[in-house]
Every structure is written in structure tokens, then in C-alpha cells.
Image: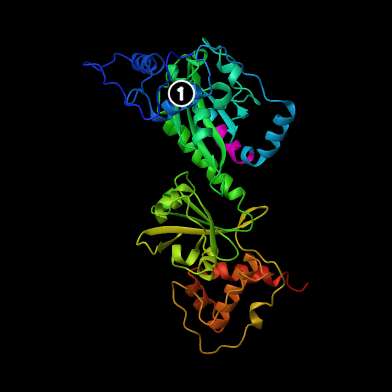
Amino acid sequence: MPRSTPRAGSRAAPLPAQPFFLSPGQRIGFARERFFGEGQRPTGLVGEAVIQSWTRCVGAHRDPHEAVAFDPVTRSRMHATLARSQTLLGAASGEIERLEAALGGTGCRVILTDGEGVVVHATRAPGGAGERVLPLAARVGVNLAESSLGTNALAVVAKTATACTVLGAEHYFEAMHSLYCAGAPIRDGQGRLAGVLDLTAESRHFGFDAAALVGVYATAIENRLLQAGAGEHLVLQFQVCNSLLGSPLEALAGVDARGRVAWLNSTAQQLLGLAAADEARDATELFGLTQTGLLSRTLADDALPLRLPNGLMVWLRARLQARDGLRRAVAVVPAPAPATLPPTAAPAVATAAEPATAGTQSTIGTPGPTLNQHTREVIERTLADCGGNISRAARTLGVSRGLLYRRLRDWAGPGPA
């Protein structure tokens, strides 16, 4: 057991007169001596997340010298964990495959856990020179949580939901001092921790910025997970630079059938100036477009510029999310051919920013119509307001005439034989 325990709120002892270290190992060794030997917080020597994890482990009466076991959880818990993690695994599969290919020559393994720290995926690789601990830890079903294996990157992320790197002797248990790991959180649409992505190497330092790399791939998985769980939401992709759409740096938002923003990824929160804890907000308040205006954006093949109410100019793409995947608006019920539209009349005035909203009462909040049906209603009402003039309607909606013709032809169904 440690000789003394740091007291809550105790002041750290002053650093030596020459607080310079020849290597990270010396710095961490001095931090352990201060913490475990003198009962002082080694502030500035190791990260605050590591210090807090050490403190929790001491409070749980764990001895840093004790042997550790990498036993899998019970069979029933493993089956339940894998069943709950199917959506996470589906969202992560492609990104993990690309990450493992990139890391092929580094000796690192990729580990994915659920939100509680149980491994649901680990790189299958033959044991390298000097690997003793990693082959035991990187197995599906092993519990890497802090309560089981003390301070490690996965455990700290699972405990705090914030990214963390733990290097060598920063691990609480001496048996794990050969490991170097970096982890990042993956959140679901409600902001809850859905999983943790981790890179771990044994007996070698990272030769690259592991924290940055794992953060990028964790964000990409999180974005895929958000879209996979979006249900029948209108999914908005936006960024200040058009080329960032489709990348891990894109902002994502899900708008529900009531016109409320149901979820945002972290990039969207930053661009919109919102905190993660903010409650659902009205889409019109955040984007300056009503549900009708946002739905009209699903007709565009490419992202279109939009000035947000906060003043930012972004490029925005809207897609309807169906339960079978992300897609654009499609026909849902039979519709009359374009020739049956009302005869030409004085067109109603519609602004470019909000097409065809005058005199229109959205039915999104009432039972019955789906987002697809409402999108179709937007098109048909705009055509009616434009007296059946396809060119005028296309300009009002900000799309091409060809796209409108294709939509109308699809809804009209096959012509007579």
C-alpha cells in the first residue's frame, strides 16, 4: 500500500530547485515518489486526469504493487454487452478497418470498448517482441475499467468521458507500466458515453501524435453512430468550408418531426455556440430557416450557403434519414402528374430564403404525415404558388429544373403502357 495518501485540498510540495528531467520516465518516477511516497499531489508532473485516477484507486484501497488479472467478464455479461454494442460496432467497423491499416507498421493495437470499459473489439495481431501484457488486455470481453485495472487511458475515458493519454508508469499498477495508450470518447445522440476508442502499444513510445489520431477516428465513429440512430430525422450537415462536409470535422444536427433539433455533434455545438447540456432548441432559432425551408434543401444535389442567425456563413446539406439509411426525399403516395396542376395564375410571392411559406401551416407536429410527405407537400405547394411554372418553382426552391422534373416523374408513377 502507499505509505501515505494525499489529503483532499492539500497543497503540493514545492518542486526541486532544478525541476528538469532527462526523460519522461524520470518525470513520472518523481511524480510517483511524490504521490505514493510523500502523499503530495504531483501537479505539473503528470496530467490532472491521471492524478485524479490515482486518487480514486488509493481511495478504493488498491495496492499499486499487486498482481492484476485480465480475466474476461462473465459469459452472460459478455453476450449482453456485445448485443447492446451492435450499433456501435456497425458504425465503427469501417473506421477501425482504416485505422488498423494505417497503424500496420507501428506495433499499436486498436481497442474499442462499450461505455463501461468492456472490450468489444481488439486488433488481432501476433504478439510482437516485448509484448507480455497487451495480448492479455486486448481481448474481447476483458474489463479494462478503472475498478478492475486501475489507471489506464480507456478506464479514465470511461470514467470521465474526456480524452486521455496514459504513458508507461502513469498506469496505477506496476504490472502495466510497459503500456502506452491514448483513448477518446464516442457519444450517442443524447450525449451519453456509447464507447471508447483506444490505441495501445507495449514497450515502445508512440512515434506520432496518438491522441490526435485516435480523436479523429473517434469523432468519425461518433458521427456515423449519430446518423445510424437518427430514426426519421432530417439530418443537417454543415461547415464553414464546403470541403469539410463528409469528413470527421463536419457539423451534424438531427431535426425531429416537430421541427426541434434533437441532437448535435460536438462540432455543431461549437459552430452554433451551444453547450452539450442545452435542451432541444427550435431549428428555426438555430438555422434561420423553418422546417419547410430546411426540407427544401433536401432537393439540392450539393451543399448550399446559409447565413446562420449567429452571423456565421456555412455550407449546409440536408438529407432525410429513413430507418433503412440516409436518403433523399422519395415518393410515398401516388400523386397527380404535373399536367394536372392548377392553371397559370398570379404567382404568390415567396422569398428565396424561405420558399413557399406564405399562408402555409406546417403539419409536421400533427400525427400522420412523415417528413417525406411534408417535403413533397413543399414542392407541390411551391408549384401551385408559381402557377405550375417549373422554372419559377425551381428558382424559388434553389434547385435545378431537371431535379424537379425527376421528382414529379417519380411521384407520377409509370405512364400508360
Q: Range of the magenta residues?
A: 90-98
Q: Is residue 288 among what the camera can see?
A: yes
Task: Residue 49: give x, y in percent of width and height.
Answer: 43, 30
Q: Is residue 269 left or right of residue 121?
A: left
- Given the current orientation, which residue lies at the most extreme left position? 17
**For residue 95: magenta?**
yes
Q: Is residue 102 above or below residue 250?
A: above
Location of the C terminus by quadrant is bottom right
Residue 304 falls in image quadrant: bottom left
Camera-nearest residue between 320 and 63: 63
Nearer to us in this view, 54 or 93: 54
Answer whether residue 97 is magenta in the image: yes
Q: Amino acid at mark 1?
A: Trp
Taking depth in this image into account, of 24 and 348 the one nearest to the observer is 24
* Residue name at image x 52 percent, y 13 percent: 175
Question: Which residue has dot 1 on it?
Answer: 54
